[in-house]
Image (cartoon, rainbow, N blue to C red):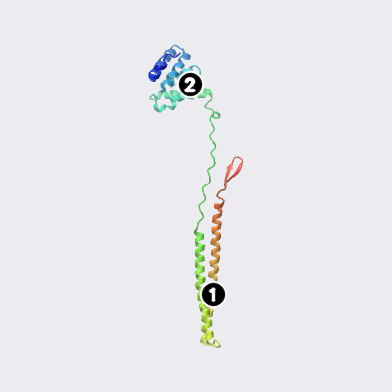
Amino acid sequence: MLAVAPRAAAADPELASRQLFKEGDTLAAAGRWSDACPYFQAAHELHSTGGTALRAADCYERTEKDARAVELYQYVVDHRAADKEPERVKLAEERLVSLKQKLGLDRPEDKPAAPASEPAPPPPAPPPSRVPVILAFTVAGVGLLTGAVAGGLALSQAGDVKTLCDMKTTCAGPSALQAQQAADSATTRAWVANIGFGVAIAEVVTGVVLIVTARSPKAKAGTARALGPDGVTVHF
């Protein structure tokens, strides 16, 4: 078995690793590669370096234990940042490529397929503009104010007509002319008042409709449509 006592290995792993490595070298120099590999492996396990990994990998490759050789060559490549010998890393990379081709590990079908990415969710819809609602109620307010003012003036002038005509029995002469002018003005202002109130009512209705339609997409916010492998799927 390996010529290192467990106590000595525990006391100084690096020293024990060097001793095992030296024993492996002696066996390898004598062509006894099968006997040398366990020594190189034990040396690597006690004190792992790029040198111990490369020597053990080379030994396993010579004894046709390619899978174990790949693991140790991969160790050298993965620890390239800590390795002070760039040539050692380069050699490990070359042997790794060769062994993977030999074992068929570089074929596309042997590589794990990348997970299919799910479609990104659609961006949230921008909130509806409040400008049309504000504009509708503003116009309604103007129409209401116009109707109120014009209606008040119409009533006032209608009262003037009644006063002028009540003062005279026949409501003739200058009083009749004044009464006619007041009546015409009252009629005009009455029409203006009616139009103002009509505009106010129409714009209030428009504003309410805009508010209701603006809220309807939110009621459906919990429904999302996503394209799956079997077609369109609706999630709630």
Residue type highlighted by circle 2: Ala
Q: Is residue 93 visible?
A: no
Residue 183: image quadrant is bottom right
- Tell me, for residue 190, which label it has, or none: 1
Q: CA distance from mark 2 to mark 1?
A: 104 Å
Left or right, 234 with respect to 58, comes to: right
Q: Residue 218: where, in percent of width, then height?
A: 54, 52
Q: Amino acid at mark 1?
A: Ala
Vertical side of 200 occupied by 9: above or below:
above
Residue, disc 2:
69
Mark 2 neighbour density, 10 Å: few (under 14) some (14–19) many (20 or more) = many
Q: Residue at x 55, y 61 (%)?
A: 208
Badge 1 crowding class, 10 Å Cα cut-off, few under 14, some 14 to 19, many 20 or more, is many
Quadrant housing residue 107:
top right
Q: Going from the N terminus, do you reach mark 2 or mark 1 first?
A: 2
Task: Give me the disc on residue 97.
Answer: none
Rendered location of residue 173, percent (x, y):
52, 88
Query: In this orientation, does residue 157 appear?
Result: yes
Q: Nearer the viewer, residue 52 or 66?
A: 52
Q: Position of residue 82 (x, y in %)?
A: 39, 27
- Please identify the residue farthest to the top as the structure is shown: 30
- Identify which residue is drawn at 52% across, 80% down: 159
Q: Are marks 2 and 1 in contact (CB under 8 Å)?
A: no
User: 57 and 179: which one is in front?
Assistant: 179
Residue located 51% across and 81% down the image: 160
Q: How many marks?
A: 2
Q: Secondary structure at mark 2?
A: helix
Which one is in front in this view, the residue at disc 2 or the one at disc 1?
1
Q: Is residue 145 above or below residue 171?
A: above
Q: Secondary structure at mark 1?
A: helix
